[in-house]
Image (spheres, grey):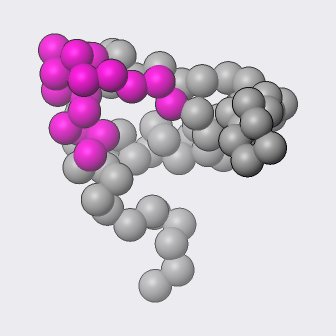
Amino acid sequence: MERIALSDSLELSRVIYGMWRLTDDADTSTRQVQAKIEVCLAQGITSFDHADIYGDYSSKKALGQCLKQPPANAQR
């Protein structure tokens, strides 16, 4: 994935995953949200667009619950 440097210490993936409809899916479980993020990461997408109002203020909670969990590929 191509990356865009914003400074010497900050760069973004060329493609940014928008989370504004994250909670529109029938399955908004932590496992499903984590799977979406991991698919993005596997493709080199490391930049995510997120705002408080997305999903009528529910996307932030869904993402936060996901981020509290260890990555699925973490070594135990």
Rendered view: 48 above or below 29: above
Quarter assignment of residue 25: top left
Front residue of 9/58: it is: 9
Give whichever of 41, 31 is nearer the camera.
Answer: 41
Q: Residue at x 22, y 16 (%)?
A: 53
The structure residue drawn at horizontal position 67% and vertical position 23%, both measured from the top left corner, is 15
Quadrant of the rendered image containing residue 12: top right
Locate residue 70 relative to residue 68 in the image: left or right. right
Q: Is residue 43 visible?
A: no
Quadrant hosting residue 40: top right
Residue most toward the right?
2
The mark total stands at 0
Please report the residue visible at 26 percent of the width from the left and 46 percent of the height from the top. Answer: 64
Q: Residue furthest bottom?
A: 76
Q: Position of residue 8 (x, y in %)?
A: 80, 44
Left-right relation of 34 to 3? left
